[in-house]
């Protein structure tokens, strides 16, 4: 039995969607496999945290879990699904699935419209558009690729994700919606994109932002360091005497645009001391401080 996703993320059941995202991001930064190479325990915990966020980060899934319709793994609790087309006068627009998307029917039944036409029932009508929701990992959205979307009837759609896809963007798959009537063309599938937050990268417009831990020696002496980007690590030169909070730019390393250009990556330096006390470093700093004190006294005299 899967663990309670609220407990996995460490939030209460009354937490807002923003609180849930912040909790996931905090844990992901701590447990992400890229930041814990070879740590199987951290990897397992990260999988549990990601699974909990997949459920609670989607408002529809979360509501269904809270109502007891699905369990912590996202599986249906009911043996039989109540399909909205089985009911006359039922609320069709409330039909949802555990796949994280909704199929919104229209208010009017196109077939009843056709039947009202009587002898003119040979009219061709275009099929209705189908609305779905697809959740992507951050890197899949910015780098693009192909993802599969499972529909309520069990069939699968291959969805081409353009590089640089944004949160809330709607992708259109022509002819993948409802069937047309009497030879009419089928409707389209309209897919709204949701993007999971990344533990390292954040996106602002077409620019990517990263916080980078910098050893004290590199901050004082400068040098070349590895920096993560959406395309993989690159080498960046850090100038001497770089303070914590300094921002460096990697041109063209941001999200791609439809015209083939790309935004930039902005790297914010965060100076960190060694994990363990270093007596030599302490001695050097002590001598440096004592020397500055002697210089100040000489100046004042």
Image (cartoon, helix red, strand yellow):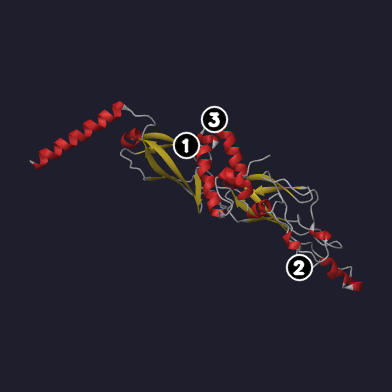
Residue 185 appears left or right of 272: right
Marks 3, 1: nearer the viewer: 3
Image location (x, y in percent) of residue 37: 53, 31
Q: Quadrant of the N terminus?
A: top right
Number of the label disc, if any, that sits on residue 107: 2
- The kind of secondary structure element at disc 2 is loop
Q: Depth check: 7 or 102 in front?
A: 7
Cα–Cα gap, marks 3 and 1:
24 Å
Q: Is residue 12 visible?
A: yes
Residue 68 appears left or right of 247: right
Residue hosting label 1? 234
Q: Are marks 2 and 3 in contact (CB under 8 Å)?
A: no
Q: Are marks 3 and 1 in contact (CB under 8 Å)?
A: no
Relative to 133, residue 73 above or below:
above
Q: Depth check: 160 or 29 in front?
A: 29
Image location (x, y in percent) of residue 81: 79, 52
Relative to 175, residue 31 above or below:
above
Q: Identify the image quadrant of residue 128.
A: bottom right
Cα–Cα gap, marks 2 and 3:
53 Å
Residue hosting label 3? 39
Image location (x, y in percent) of residue 254: 50, 47
């Amino acid at each position: 039995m899967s663990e309670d996703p609220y407990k996995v993320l460490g939030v209460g059941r009354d937490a807002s969607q923003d609180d849930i995202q912040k909790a996931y991001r905090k844990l992901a930064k701590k447990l992400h496999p890229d930041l814990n190479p070879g740590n199987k325990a951290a990897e397992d915990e990260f999988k549990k945290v990601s699974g909990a966020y997949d459920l609670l980060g989607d408002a529809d899934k979360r509501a269904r879990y809270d109502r007891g319709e699905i369990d912590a793994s996202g599986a249906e609790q009911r043996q039989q699904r109540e399909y909205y087309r089985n009911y006359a006068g039922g609320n069709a627009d409330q039909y949802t699935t555990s796949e994280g998307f909704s199929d919104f029917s229209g208010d009017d039944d196109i077939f009843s419209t056709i039947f009202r036409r009587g002898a003119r029932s040979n009219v061709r009508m275009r099929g209705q558009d189908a609305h779905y929701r697809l959740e992507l990992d951050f890197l899949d959205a910015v780098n693009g690729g192909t993802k599969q979307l499972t529909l309520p009837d069990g069939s699968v759609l291959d969805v081409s994700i353009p590089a640089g896809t944004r949160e809330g963007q709607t992708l259109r798959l022509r002819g993948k919606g409802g069937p047309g009537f009497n030879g009419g063309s089928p409707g389209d599938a309209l897919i709204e994109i949701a993007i999971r937050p990344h533990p390292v990268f954040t996106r602002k417009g077409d620019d990517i932002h990263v916080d980078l831990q910098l050893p004290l020696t590199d901050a004082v002496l400068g040098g070349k360091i590895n920096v993560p980007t959406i395309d993989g690590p690159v080498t960046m030169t850090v100038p001497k005497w770089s303070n914590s909070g300094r921002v460096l730019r990697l041109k063209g390393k941001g999200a791609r645009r439809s015209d083939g250009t790309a935004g930039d990556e902005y790297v914010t330096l965060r100076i960190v001391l060694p994990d363990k006390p270093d007596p030599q470093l302490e001695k050097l700093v002590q001598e440096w401080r004592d020397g500055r004190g002697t210089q100040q006294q000489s100046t004042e005299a």
